[in-house]
Image: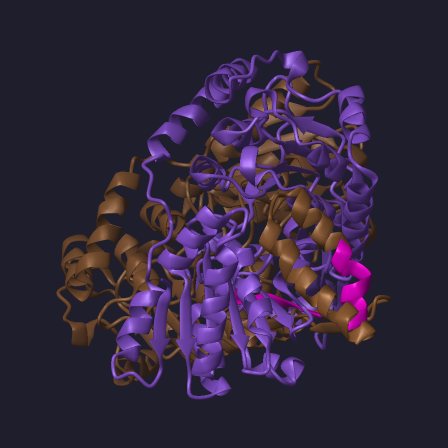
Chain colours: A brown, B purple
Amino acid sequence: MPLFLDTSSPNFDAEFDNFLHLKRDTDVQVDAVVADILADVQTRGDAAVIDLTAKFDGMDLTPETLAFTKAEIDAAIETVPAAERAALELAADRIRAYHEKQLPEDAWWQDDSGAQLGWRWSAVEAAGLYVPGGLASYPSSVLMNAIPASVAGVENLVICAPTPKGAVNPLVLLAARLSGVETVYRIGGAQAVGAMAYGTQTIGKVDKITGPGNAFVAAAKRRVFGTVGIDMIAGPSEILVIADKDNNPDWIAMDLLSQAEHDESAQSILITDNADFARAVAASVEKALETLERREIAAKSWADYGAVIVTSDLDQAAKLSDRIAPEHLELCVADAADYSRKIRHAGAIFIGAWTPEAIGDYVGGPNHVLPTSRSARFSSGLSVLDFMKRTTLAQMTPAALRAIGPAAETLAISESLQAHGLSVRARLDQMNEDDNG
Amino acid sequence: MPLFLDTSSPNFDAEFDNFLHLKRDTDVQVDAVVADILADVQTRGDAAVIDLTAKFDGMDLTPETLAFTKAEIDAAIETVPAAERAALELAADRIRAYHEKQLPEDAWWQDDSGAQLGWRWSAVEAAGLYVPGGLASYPSSVLMNAIPASVAGVENLVICAPTPKGAVNPLVLLAARLSGVETVYRIGGAQAVGAMAYGTQTIGKVDKITGPGNAFVAAAKRRVFGTVGIDMIAGPSEILVIADKDNNPDWIAMDLLSQAEHDESAQSILITDNADFARAVAASVEKALETLERREIAAKSWADYGAVIVTSDLDQAAKLSDRIAPEHLELCVADAADYSRKIRHAGAIFIGAWTPEAIGDYVGGPNHVLPTSRSARFSSGLSVLDFMKRTTLAQMTPAALRAIGPAAETLAISESLQAHGLSVRARLDQMNEDDNG
């Protein structure tokens, strides 16, 4: 049974607070193991990666077979049925179109002092995308990571995707191809993160690593952060649906289950202003769970982390939503676009009952790599900007330096940084000499 | 003596590569200590912060004296000389004007399928700025951290600044006031980071922590990353000056020293296409070092990490610069603005000989919190965007869902995520029913 809360209950605040701080992350002690793996990869390069892949993935590789050949990728892609290929192409096109709108503008202006100021954006040169193997091997995630990098202008894009005991997902290779990625390494885990961060004899060092992964991958990304850039470290995924009574309970139930079926740590939450509707959705969830393919996973997620919250009105629902700061937020209410303006903290909003969250996972266009575990309070989904960086620009004229240089000199002296002040003073003195000469 | 390299030397490539990988970070084993401190703060809150501040800063605090009172801040600010106050106000105004241009645009458009797509930016609610104590207590850094947060719209901005044995820098408090920060805690180290990340009885939990600090602060920020957002973890600072022979060697020497005087791990590099000019600058550095106030620090930095590189032409200089990816890059060459387009990886560029880097530290307008240790390959200086986050938006119509929903369903099934597919199918079936009904 999921948690049922009602804002009219005298204990609501305490119960909601407990709910907010429910821990869903698996606390595995992996950090020490990961530190050893990273050190090994840094020292021994290819040999370490190959040994670790034999150990963890049961795969015997050589430097020559670390990456798929073009022929291997071609052959795998051939096996993809036409309908799946068409669907993936539609998704790729829509994701590309959305992300192209994110390309940032450069700026360059003159201010009152005569100084020219601005900034210029540029792409990182090399990025590595981690794609989990096994159950969590999602071709859609390949698109969501690689297309923003490609739109940003990253020249050198590689993928690491483990193939435990040789298992390959042809759709992953097709998604790589549709995203413009030619190099796919059949390695995973902390060793793949290490190989991309430090480089090996065969695998080139990248500047940025993105993509989801298990606890070992997350710990490795945290450790190499600084040597390379990383995206947010993803926690378990969650959906919050705010729905009024004028909804089909079966739709909302299935939306909740579409999150719950991801994994046992996923979280699905319904907030509604109608207790009867809440009960109808909960009943529909139970019924759907009887036949759902991934019913064991979904049922455990729903029982352990699911929640149904009844509020006195929809304003209150928006306020609670902001405290949850959900990764995915579905707004199935009247005038949903207007209502969405009440929301401040959410990774992605799905507006109106015709927008099930699953649309956003695949073909909507916005990214599905989103801030989890309440981190939408301070971070954003993956975007083109994650693969770009900004260089600030400043150009003084003599007049501008005369106007603002003395203030810099004063502050430098106040901070006991004499050479800072002298570097400005040398120029100002020259100007005065020129004036008098 | 700094390193001298000449691109015409047969060993240049190997020598340059060694130079690139020179380690400047102090490798102190602080992580375990920091883990204990963070756990203590999380468990005991104020009591832990107070005990640790007594231990490390020799300060006896109570929950009531953790923060400066308004009267204490007023009194400290009164002591700031008028010239310094005016300089800090000029700096604050210019930094604010520059950063206001960074405010991002929301977007909302309709695509061919009839779907509405877009995104909306919002500020984080609470941010905490770390301001080091002692020697590295820079009021300019307060402005550079707090003003972008204020421009972004962060409502709740606090500062933690240790006051070892009670030492207070009135300019830091004035900078806080000019940036709109009312709450300044007199605490530092990992305990301050922990207090802001987890909250205590007295100190409110924030969503984002920025600002420079020593190895303990850096390790603490790395550990709380995920619970809160953080800015980049700063390494030792560096400057690269590319200068042709038509420069005053004394100016360039002082620019190099303005970096070297920061700390012994700082790095100053000159690249020039003229060997005579290189020698003249090196000689000027030696001469200036005789009298510079911070000559011990600057001389050690210059000897241990300084470098002078002579290239065959300025194109080669730009290429080497991109491999170094400097935090600060000064371009003292003809047509410097044009030349700057050859550069891809740099935190900030100072264009032309009238733009000493020190201008950017204080009053130029761009931020002085910049990516160090070659991380300009993948990251940017601090900006308004660091205190905002983006929520993506999608709204389907029935027609849009009919156009793209089947592809989502196909991909969901291919990823064995049945409920994802069913959440789309339920809506499509309803439409078909409506059509036929």
Q: Nearer the viewer, residue B42 or A88?
A: B42
Find residue B371 and report its horizontal and vertical position in percent. 52, 58
Residue B330 place in picture, x, y as percent: 58, 70
On the image, the x and y values in percent for residue B263 come to 47, 48
* Magenta stretch holds residue B262: no
Q: Nearer the viewer, residue A317 or A69?
A: A69
* Residue B426 shows up from this direction: yes
- Left/right of residue A340 with respect to residue A389 in the rendered view: right
How many numbered badges does the structure rendering display?
0
Residue drawn at x 79%, y 40% as measured from the top left? B178
In the picture as drawn, the residue positioned furthest to the right comes out as: A112
Task: Please identify the quadrant where the C terminus of chain B is shown.
Answer: bottom right
Q: Position of residue B77 (x, y in %)?
A: 78, 30
The residue under the point 49% across, 14% down is B51
Q: In which quadrant is the N terminus of chain B drawn? A: bottom left
Highlighted magenta segment, given as a residue range: A386-406
* Residue drawn where x is 77% and y is 43% of the image: B84
Residue B171, placed above or below residue A35: above
Residue A393 inside the magenta-drawn segment: yes
Query: Residue at 66% across / 32% down in the picture?
Result: B169
